[in-house]
Image: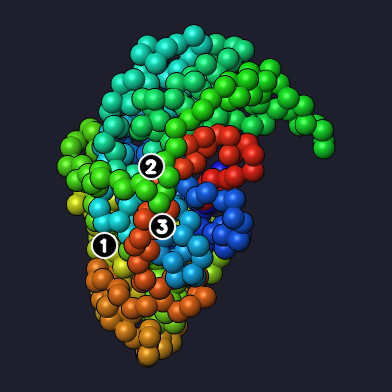
Amino acid sequence: MSAPGDSTNIDRSNPEWTVDTFARYQSVVDVFAQYPNVLGFFAGNEVTNNFSNTQASAFVKAAIRDTKAYIASKNYRAIPVGYSANDDSITREPEAEYFACAPSTASADFYGINMYEWCGNATYQSSGYEARTEQFANFSIPIFFSEYGCNTVQPRTFSEVQAIYSSPMTDVWSGGIVYEWFQETNDYGLVTQSGSTVSVLPDYTALSIQLAEISPTRAIESSYNPSNSAPPCPSPTADVWEAAVSLPPTPNEDLCNCVPSTLQCVAKPNLPAQNISSLFGTICGTLGVDCSGINANGTYPGQYGAFSPCDATVKLSWLMNKYYLERNKAAGACDFGGQATTQSAQSPSGTCATLLNEAGSEGTGTVTGSLTAGSGGTSKSAASGLYGTWGDFRIMSAVVVAFLGGVALVVV
């Protein structure tokens, strides 16, 4: 739901689930929910890509939870929300278990793996496809190849298509999406584009031939009764999987908007990002202020401040004010090198009073207050039952065929 290079991405090196990021996800849902050919939304793609950043998955799973709830609260049709992972041998299994494990309100509705194990004249056995199929034989949610099409041997013949769309793979996998449509410098394209002219490449022809020969098995939704149960969430293990089961809070724009007017010391407007970052380090480090209220740590067991979803300036102002009050409003305590200023604070009332009281003076409380409709947030209504409404993903087993024919999975 975010764009490459966009500041609203969930960054694996510094993951956050914020008001602004959630607003971006909501805007994508609002645009694409109207199209009946949208099969689902990807809440992230390879955000965790090895054992060193598994904590980032807690933020993606929070995005899945809140996006599902948002879809339900808007009374859109039940569009599934899932995740696309890389094929890392260490994190492959615990990552899949993590996104599939309960509760259903936060679990992925489908799971994709970017799979490039079949290269050249490989076979079902030699490629690793057999091992992966056995590994995920009892997986509880629809699983498919969110990318495939190794290009280390060219031209690509796509012989793997016959395996992907026949038994035993169709008993486990729900097809796949070939990477990629337009030719780029990485040389994975099926077509080239010049202006309004699109020309097919040899890979397109090879893929077309392979797809014309398949007859994938299908399940009829009305008669399909899946028996696999959700797996337990993976136990935290150093150097394998450390993402917390406890997830970041739902971004509450109302709470964040309430903060600035209640503070006696605030950051000056329009501070450069590097200054803000440096001030965080000074306040939380050198000055020794407890920053739990704005921190977000997805490493097990998971620790998230009530104000962690707010934007950087709001969080900085809250910390400055905290320090100012701890110093009993001493002269110079609200200066920070000329980057802060005092103001007359307003006493919160109504909803603001409730939300701020729940957050607590240290910002470590749990905020349960409902969000204002249309405020960039969503109600707390759960999106349970999405999977049941979606049914079996295998009814669209030939995902790549549908994709090329105008059915889309949206990377959100």
Q: Distance between the residues labelled 1 and 3?
A: 39 Å
Please tell me the numbered disc located at residue 142.
2
Distance, label 2 to label 3, CA atoms, is: 13 Å
> Which residue is drawn at the image coordinates 82% and 37% (left, top)?
196
Instruction: Tell me which numbered mark, 2 or 1, is placed earlier along the sequence.
Output: 2
Reading the image, the residue beneath label 3 is 389
Q: Is mark 2 on a helix, strand or loop?
A: loop
Residue type marked 1: Ser
- What color scheme is it? rainbow
Disc 2 from disc 1: Cα separation = 38 Å
In terms of secondary structure, where does tag 3 sit? helix
As drawn, the residue found furthest toward the front would be 223
Q: Label 3 amino acid?
A: Thr
Using residue 221 as the reference point, say whether residue 292 is left or right of it: left
Q: Residue 292 carries which label?
A: 1
Q: Residue at x 58, y 15 (%)?
A: 157
* Callout in the foreground (1, 3): 3
Residue 20 visible here: no
Is 4 on the left-hand or right-hand side of 43? right
